[in-house]
Image: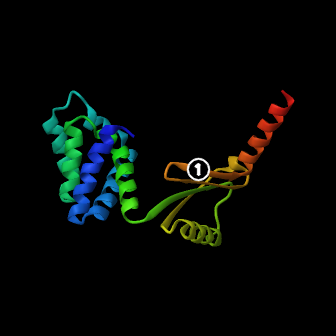
Amino acid sequence: MTQVAQNYADALYDLARDEGFDKQILDELTGVERLFGENPDYVRLLSASNLRKSEKLGVLDEAFSGRVHTYLLSFLKLLCEQGHIRELPNCLRRCRSRYNEDHGILDLLAISAVPLSEEMRAKLIRRVADLTGKHVELRSKVDPGVLGGLRLEYEGKSLDGTVRQRLDGLKKALSDTVL
């Protein structure tokens, strides 16, 4: 994450938290970032050097005025004016991280070869919550390349208990022994 994104996101989050709008801002920021991701031409337009800043701000007003909190609209305009609108995904990550930290939430990604059953999801959430003392928000992803087992990713860390990881470790051990 760039320092620019961190600084802007921290300013937005601190203001929203102090005013009691942190959840609303996070939800709306998530929606805006998703919209930008689905419409990359919109981001290119807001980044275009041949478009005056006043025109870019007008585009933002037209799209979001009355639809998002004024703090978020002002934030988007500031990013646009300063030429940092492409930092929005990093800003969202930083705001989400700060929100989760403030509210005792652990954002956990479970990667498995097949979809997790509801029973397995509940068991995993319960186990991780017991270990961490945090409320666990579980997202899951299917990756047939893991072959079996589970890889957990959270707070920039990874716990890999997959068959793929074990096979790779065995292969490395065997090649080290042979050489």
Q: How many labels does the image show?
A: 1
Residue 55 in the image, given as x and y percentages of width and height: 15, 38
Q: Can residue 86 be seen at all in this image of the molecule?
A: no
Q: Residues within 10 Å of mark 1 (few under 14, many from 20)?
A: few
Q: For the residue marked with disc 1, what is the amino acid?
A: Ser
The spot of residue 59 in percent (x, y) is 20, 44
Quarter that holds the C terminus: top right
- x%, y% of residue 97? 40, 54
Q: In this view, does 2 lie to the left or right of 16?
A: right
Residue 179 in sight in this render? yes
Q: What residue appears at the point 22 percent right and 62 percent down from the top-left corner? A: 18
Q: Identify residue for label 1.
A: 158
Compared to 162, does 168 lie above or below?
A: above
Image position of 47 with respect to 74: above or below: above
Residue under the image location 24 percent in, 66 percent down:
20
- Residue 77, quarter of the rendered image: top left
Q: Residue at x 42, y 65 (%)?
A: 104
Task: Assign a secondary structure to mark 1.
Answer: strand
| Front-most of residues 43 and 156 | 156
Instruction: Report x, y in % for residue 174.
Output: 83, 36
Q: On the picture, is 146 further left or further right than 34?
A: right
In this view, the residue in front, 171 or 83, is 171
Which residue: 36% across, 38% down? 2
Q: Which colour scheme is used?
A: rainbow
Vertical comparison of 96 with 37: above or below: below
Instruction: Return the residue found at the far left.
Output: 54
> Seen from this angle, which residue lies furthest right?
178
Quadrant for the N terminus, please.
top left
